[in-house]
Amino acid sequence: MQFNKIIGQAALKARLIGNIREGRVPHAQFFLGPRGSGVLPLALAYATYLFCEHPGEGDSCGRCNACKMMAKLAHPDLNMAFPIFFVDKKPRTCDYYTEDWRDAVLEEPYLDADQWRERLKGENKQLRMGVDIAGEMLRKLSLKAFRGGWKVMLIWLPEMMDPLMANKILKVLEEPAPGTVFLLAGHTHDRILPTILSRTQLVKVPALDPGELASALQERYPELASETARHIAARSEGDLLEAMAMAEGREEEVFVFLRDWLRACYAGKMGEVVAFTDYFAKMGREKQKGLMRYALYVIRQALLQRQDLPQLIASFGEEMEFVRKFGALLDAWATEGLRRALEEAHAQLERNANPKVLFLDLSYALGTLMRPERHLA
């Protein structure tokens, strides 16, 4: 991965390269940004530049042996830690899954936890990093660099580290061997031990610029009209993966599910709600949380519609039509209630709540909140 392959982030890329060229390489950095912003590609591009034998002013050369090995994520001094499933009779270390993870990143460098989970065929399981991975990391870091230069320990999604793992790597994270660099790449910091955060330098990665994202979409999908690409880029809020899902039509199924579910809740059709609940329970935890986030987005769009702020609305097509009617249905009290209910449901899903019980309770709450004398059609 080279910096020139990463969408946007020009100022951040220039700063990172400048730091390396000036000899200011922190021993531990945490690339923190929203999903689809490029935290993992940036960390990998940074490692490539460190390893490059002939780095230029604006990027790694892409031609030396180190760059060629990094292009395959096969550099011997690149060590990788990432979340896995804990399965009986299988190792709880990353080495067992490295080939799968390498293939997944090479296929889509903007990889997220959902895609990784699907590749491992563990839809309803929790991804974790435990103490065995910490031991694996310490063993690798105790070895000398194979090529005599930098050693990099990349930790993808550090928010999934168990407390035992986090505590075990504290000392080496604070005082690594000379020439060792930790690169953490994740999307949230509130689930990471403060003692880990205090030992890293934060690199804030912003969401992608809508204009740059629209251009990237048209490169990936040449058949996509420029106006559609702009709408999708605005709707995705700088998330490349979300934008790709919309460009490929994968978001349509989620919209139809949400629309029909809300209609059933509003009408009090409990038979339909129970059917939706059964479907919801089979979606997998990450997709369940994604539905809650999408519902919050629709409510936000409906509120903007109700307040007559069309310049801020990113919806279009059938979604826009639904937003208009949904906005006419809601008042301030109902909107706030819906927001609270959905955010609480999202939090409960993160705590492994029973999805059937949660979804039935949520359906009843949403139906009650939406029930003033208007129609959702």
Image (cartoon, grey):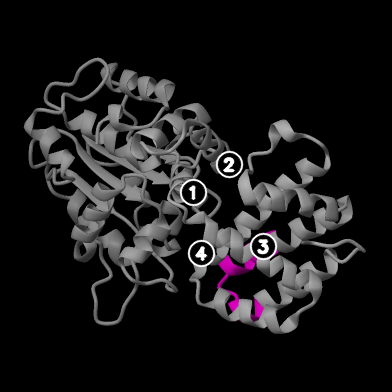
Residue 160: quadrant of the picture: bottom left
Callout 4 secondary element: helix
In this view, which residue lies farthest toward the right? 373
Magenta segment includes 354: yes
Q: Amino acid at mark 2?
A: Arg
Q: Earlier in the sequence, mark 2 or mark 1?
A: 2
Q: Measured from the top left, where is residue 163 in percent x and y? A: 45, 62
Work out how far the residue at label 4 is from the one at label 3, CA to CA, in angstroms: 16 Å
Q: Earlier in the sequence, mark 1 or mark 3?
A: 1
Q: What residue is shown with label 2? A: 235
Mark 3 is surrounded, within 10 Å at the Cα level, by few (under 14), some (14 to 19) or many (20 or more) other residues, namely some
Callout 3 secondary element: helix
Callout 1 secondary element: helix
Work out how far the residue at label 2 is from the one at label 1, CA to CA, in angstroms: 9 Å
Q: Is residue 50 above or below residue 160?
A: above
Q: Earlier in the sequence, mark 4 or mark 1?
A: 1
Q: Measured from the top left, where is residue 342 in percent x and y? A: 70, 61
Would residue 59 be seen by someone viewing this image from the given angle? yes
Q: What residue is shown with label 3? A: 259
Work out how far the residue at label 2 is from the one at label 4, CA to CA, in angstroms: 18 Å
**Which one is in front, 330 or 260?**
260
Residue 62: quadrant of the picture: top left
Q: What residue is shown with label 4? A: 287
- Say whether marks 2 and 1 touch (CB < 8 Å): yes
Q: Which residues are magenta?
A: 343-358
Residue 103: quadrant of the picture: bottom left
- Say whether marks 4 and 3 touch (CB < 8 Å): no
